[in-house]
């Protein structure tokens, strides 16, 4: 894995956070599109869902 210099740390973290957000949005969109009949499929990504507290 690539370890950024201390100066780049926050910039890299911001970029990875944006990438993660895009990834989650994409996953959520796919889940909703694939499981429109089964609404429980979209609950997987939500906190406090099944077994989560």
Image: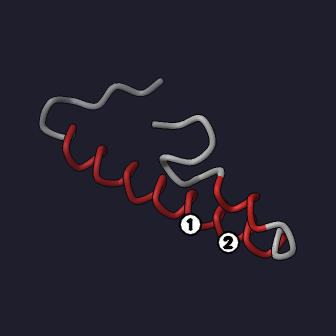
> For this view, does 19 lie left or right of residue 28?
left
The image position of residue 11, as x and y in percent, is 23, 49
Query: Quick one: quadrant of the C terminus?
Result: top left
* CA separation in Å, label 1 and label 2: 6 Å
Residue that carries the numbered disc 2 in the rendered image: 29
Above-or-below relation of 24 to 11: below
**Which of the 4 quarters of the picture holds residue 31?**
bottom right
Give the residue at x 83% y 68%. 35
Q: Residues within 10 Å of mark 1 (few under 14, many from 20)?
A: few
Task: Count the numbered circles shown.
Answer: 2
Give the residue at x 76% y 58%. 41
Give the residue at x 15% y 30%. 6
Q: Nearer the viewer, residue 24 or 16?
A: 24
Q: Secondary structure at mark 1?
A: helix
Above-or-below relation of 30 to 11: below
Q: Residues within 10 Å of mark 2 (few under 14, many from 20)?
A: few
Q: Are marks 1 and 2 in contact (CB under 8 Å)?
A: yes
Disc number placed over residue 25 in the picture, else none: 1
> For this view, does 28 lie left or right of residue 16?
right
Q: Nearer the viewer, residue 15 or 41?
A: 41
> For this view, does 4 lie left or right of residue 24?
left
The image position of residue 10, as x and y in percent, is 19, 44
The way the protein has been coloured in the rendering is secondary structure
Give the residue at x 57% y 48%. 49
Q: Nearer the viewer, residue 5 or 14?
A: 14
> For this view, does 18 lie left or right of residue 30?
left
Above-or-below relation of 14 to 34: above
């Amino acid at each position: 894995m690539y370890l950024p210099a201390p100066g780049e740390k926050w910039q890299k973290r911001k970029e990875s956070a944006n990438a993660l957000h895009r990834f989650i949005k994409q996953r959520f969109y796919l889940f909703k599109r694939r499981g429109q009949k089964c609404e429980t499929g979209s609950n997987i990504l939500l906190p406090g869902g099944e077994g989560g507290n």
